[in-house]
């Protein structure tokens, strides 16, 4: 429940109160950021914004992996 509330931007003090913890230190182990939250945070970084803009303009083409082609026997 704590992770879901955190993903909805509920303040940790509110989550602490809901869970009945005496301090936020007791609440922190129950909060795990979702992959989507991590992605959104990473997209706010200036370097990531810059690279995304270069890709959007077609000035940068990144290819990290070759397409998979099974061997034919």
Image (spheres, rainbow, N blue to C red):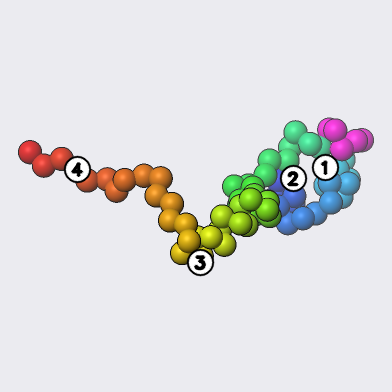
Q: Which one is earlier in the sequence, the residue at label 3 or at label 2? A: 2
Label 4 sits on residue: 70
Q: Nearer the viewer, mark 1 or mark 3?
A: 3
State the CA–CA distance, disc 1 to disc 3: 47 Å
Comparing 51 with 68, the one in front is 51
Q: Which one is earlier in the sequence, the residue at label 4 or at label 1? A: 1
- Residue 46 x %, y %: 68, 53
Asked if residue 11 lies in the magenta stretch, the reply is: no
- Residue 55 x %, y %: 50, 60
Q: Nearer the viewer, mark 1 or mark 2?
A: 2
State the CA–CA distance, disc 4 to disc 1: 51 Å
Please identify the quarter of the rendering in which residue 30 is found: top right
Comparing 42 with 63, the one in front is 63
Q: Which one is earlier in the sequence, the residue at label 4 or at label 3? A: 3
Q: Is residue 24 left or right of residue 38?
A: right
Label 1 sits on residue: 19
Mark 3: few/some/many CA within 10 Å (<14, 14-19, 20+)? few
Label 3 sits on residue: 57
- Main secondary structure along the magenta-highlighted residues: helix
State the CA–CA distance, disc 4 to disc 3: 33 Å
Question: Mark 4 falls on what kind of element?
Answer: loop
Which region shows up in magenta? Answer: 22-26
Residue at x-position 88% and y-position 46%: 13
Asked if residue 24 lies in the magenta stretch, the reply is: yes
Question: Mark 3 falls on what kind of element?
Answer: helix
């Amino acid at each position: 429940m704590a992770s879901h509330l955190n993903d909805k931007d509920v303040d940790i003090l509110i989550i602490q109160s809901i869970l009945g913890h005496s301090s936020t230190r007791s609440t922190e182990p129950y909060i795990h950021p979702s992959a989507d939250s991590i992605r959104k945070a990473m997209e706010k970084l200036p370097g990531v914004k810059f690279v995304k803009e270069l890709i959007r303009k077609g000035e940068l083409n990144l290819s990290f992996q070759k397409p998979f082609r099974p061997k034919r026997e």
